Image: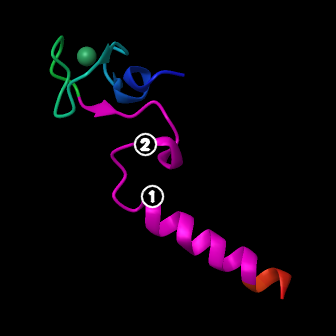
């Protein structure tokens, strides 16, 4: 998977893909990342969640 693929967002209204993040350039509909949050390069909490998961796994194995 290339990096450009990860930057594409999907319109919830017409279903088209776009590089825009605020709204669909075709119909003005709301955009949504077609990828799960853990794959989103824009997720500000991704690092925190990964860290939390590591902590959970660690405590489980102890
Ligand atoms: Zn649209």
58 to the left or right of 12: right
**Residue 41 sits in which quadrant?**
top left
Q: Position of residue 7 (x, y in %)?
A: 35, 28
On whether ligand 1 comes within 8 Å of the CB at mark 1, the answer is no
Question: In the rendered image, which residue does mark 2 sit on?
Answer: 40
| Marks 1 and 2 in Cβ contact (< 8 Å) | yes
Q: Image quadrant of ligand 1? A: top left
Location of residue 45 with respect to 4 vertically, above or below: below
43 to the left or right of 24: right
Question: In the rendered image, which residue does mark 1 sit on?
Answer: 46
Residues drawn in magenta? 30-58
- Residue at x-position 18% and y-position 11%: 26
Q: Position of residue 55 (x, y in %)?
A: 64, 79
In the structure shown, which secondary structural element does the residue marked by tag 1 occupy?
helix
40 to the left or right of 62: left
47 to the left or right of 27: right
């Amino acid at each position: 998977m290339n990096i450009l693929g990860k930057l594409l967002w999907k319109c919830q209204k017409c279903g088209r893909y776009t590089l825009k993040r605020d709204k669909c350039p075709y119909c003005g509909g709301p955009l949504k990342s077609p990828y799960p949050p853990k794959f989103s390069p824009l997720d500000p909490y991704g690092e925190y969640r990964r860290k939390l998961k590591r902590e959970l796994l660690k405590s489980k194995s102890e």
